[in-house]
Image (cartoon, coloured by chain):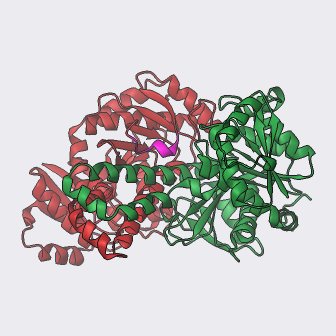
Chain colours: A green, B red
């Protein structure tokens, strides 16, 4: 039985979405036991609403406090020990039978507590987020880092490439992930010093399938499996991709309602439009894994609904079955810059 | 009569699109005279193809050489004096009657020659690109810088805010442009040191309508008129916005052809789909103005067609009629950090 702890607070739809998502995951996966962290009364009330929930598959870890987006991450760790996040993190650290954690709370606090309380894998300089998005050719593409590290060195970027490649290989079955460096142009000499140096390091990284620079306009094209970036521009990339797709679909919907004949046409295409909407729905793709920590940590979108939470839990279970951490330590320690 | 010099080479569709675009612009604007820079024989051949062209409105500036995307910008300036770009830049610098230049060639060479040959306005530390995109609410939004400066200081970002605000006010008629700083979160303390420092500087800039940080997902929402960013993340922002919109429309088109009933529906919505496509078509919105140089320089998209080139020329004429440069020098020199 895999044990996963779910931080039930800190998201926009907490705790309802977290509890309902946990129930969904428990019904989809046979061998998972879920520990729900947060205010006991509220979590119980949410569980009681779902008649199909098998209560033998859950345990509540009472935590009266909540880390809010405004809390400074390091303060949250020191001052909010009784929060749903920090209680979950402590359990993850101290209990060998708990394999992973899912949280939709503050990214900063998840990164800080993951790094400082759970600890990094051997040789890893900085854990990094790696969300997965759908490409236009039916595959997926990962971005590492998407926001855990707003300031980076070229060596961090090299490690992101290694961690992300192994993640896509082990968890998504992509044998030799095609890795690109996010840059302002495709030529090797493009970008600032950080990106020029990272290009050189990636080029000489053994066993890495490095394909050169990528401009952000090619992100969804299906040409690459992993995009390596500093956390700042990676964050700009995924949020603008998500924002543009959502805004455009919203606009199309609005325009459809502007004329009767469009409404008629849209009626014939209803199934297609629902598929387009579902295609760009981040809820289906789970959360951002924090790669490089000793235990599995998954950060869901702040506005995650039930489905997204369930997918994050499924993702944690899938990761637990892989040998990602061992392989990551082994490859990172082979890098010339490694301190292992 | 406004004189504008058009670099007819260096774009993907050169010189056909540049010459045809120049003819279009000459027909749309009464008082413009266009100087076409590049290989005389080829430009003449293109002009001859267009029977409606009024040859009295054009002059050819013969330039046998071309700056290619692979040329290092500073090398292009020193070694390619006979290129269509450098001949155009020299004319712009030396001839007081020439008001501006349009080029669809190498961005790096345009920035370098604009900065080094044309020169910066008084007090301006770094010229910056400011493309304009459509928002979902029917307005426009500018991004400054979108790639001229991949490494920035907070003072540069403050100047980009000033230059961009005056551009949107003078050329797009937005009285008090709402300015946002591109960042990884909306809270003031988000981002790396550069962005924290820029946030503080922007907050204390007199007469600037600074509205705080913006996450890239809100770029097209219509909440802001100008997004201030370092050139690296600004470049990621506009190219991913453009790429996502184009890829999504391409996917919808492909899906329509997958089933007969969708094709029927799409037939009823043909006009709407054409409007959506046109809405996201960068060709309509002209090029990226290089703000902060002594004369008007407009960089068109490398893949510009006729329409985009014509719009760039119209943009140059519109700018020439404004008092942008005087106002920019005046405001920049009022900044506490100014060296005027």
Coordinates of residue B242 in the picture (x, y in percent)? 41, 57
Coordinates of residue A189 in the picture (x, y in percent)? 59, 64
- Counting labels gives 0
Coordinates of residue A88 in the picture (x, y in percent)? 81, 40
**Within the image, what quadrant is residue B220 found in?**
top left
> For the C terminus of chain B, which image quadrant?
top left
User: For this rendering, which residue is in front, A48 or A90?
Assistant: A48
User: For this rendering, which residue is in front, A206 or B6?
Assistant: A206
Q: Is residue A72 left or right of residue A90?
A: left
User: For this rendering, which residue is in front, A158 or B50?
Assistant: A158
- The residue lying at 82 percent from left, 29 percent from top is A82
Report if residue B309 is visible in the image.
no
Coordinates of residue A165 in the picture (x, y in percent)? 72, 67
- The residue lying at 65 percent from left, 45 percent from top is A20
Residue B189 sits inside the magenta stretch: no
Report if residue B178 is visible in the image.
yes
**Within the image, what quadrant is residue A205 found in?**
bottom right
Q: Is residue A140 above or below residue A122?
A: below
Q: Is residue B152 left or right of residue A263?
A: right
Q: Which region shows up in magenta? A: B215-221
Residue B217 sits inside the magenta stretch: yes
Q: Is residue A329 above or below residue A297?
A: below
**Within the image, what quadrant is residue B162 found in?**
top left
Q: Is residue B13 left or right of residue B127?
A: left
């Amino acid at each position: 039985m895999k044990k996963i702890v779910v931080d039930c607070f800190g998201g926009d739809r907490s705790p309802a979405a977290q509890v309902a998502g946990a129930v969904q995951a428990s019904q989809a996966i046979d061998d998972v036991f879920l520990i729900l962290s947060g205010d006991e009364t509220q979590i119980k009330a949410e569980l009681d609403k779902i008649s199909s929930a098998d209560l033998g598959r859950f345990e509540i870890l009472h935590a009266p406090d909540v880390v809010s987006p405004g809390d400074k991450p390091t303060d949250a760790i020191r001052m909010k020990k009784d929060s749903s996040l920090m209680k979950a993190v402590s359990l993850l650290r101290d209990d060998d039978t708990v394999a992973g954690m899912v949280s939709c709370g503050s990214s900063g606090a998840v990164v800080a507590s993951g790094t400082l309380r759970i600890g990094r894998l051997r040789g890893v300089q900085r854990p990094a987020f790696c969300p997965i998005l759908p490409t236009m050719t039916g595959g997926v593409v990962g971005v590492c880092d998407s926001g855990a590290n707003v300031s980076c060195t070229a060596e961090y970027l090299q490690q992101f490439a290694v961690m992300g490649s192994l993640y896509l290989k082990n968890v998504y079955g992509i044998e030799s992930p095609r890795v690109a460096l996010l840059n302002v142009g495709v030529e090797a000499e493009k970008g600032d010093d950080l990106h020029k140096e990272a290009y050189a390091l990636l080029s000489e990284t053994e066993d890495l399938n490095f394909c050169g620079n990528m401009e952000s306009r090619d992100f969804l094209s299906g040409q690459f499996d992993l995009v390596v970036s500093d956390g700042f521009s990676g964050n700009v990339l995924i949020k603008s991709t998500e924002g543009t797709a959502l805004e455009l679909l919203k606009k199309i919907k609005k325009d459809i309602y502007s004329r009767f004949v469009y409404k008629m046409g849209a009626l014939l295409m209803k199934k297609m439009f629902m598929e387009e909407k579902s295609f760009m729905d981040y809820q289906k793709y789970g959360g951002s894994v924090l790669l490089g920590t000793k235990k599995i940590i998954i950060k869901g979108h702040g506005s995650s609904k039930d489905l997204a939470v369930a997918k994050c839990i499924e993702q944690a279970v899938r990761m637990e079955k892989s040998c990602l951490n061992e392989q990551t330590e082994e490859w990172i320690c082979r890098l010339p810059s490694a301190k292992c």
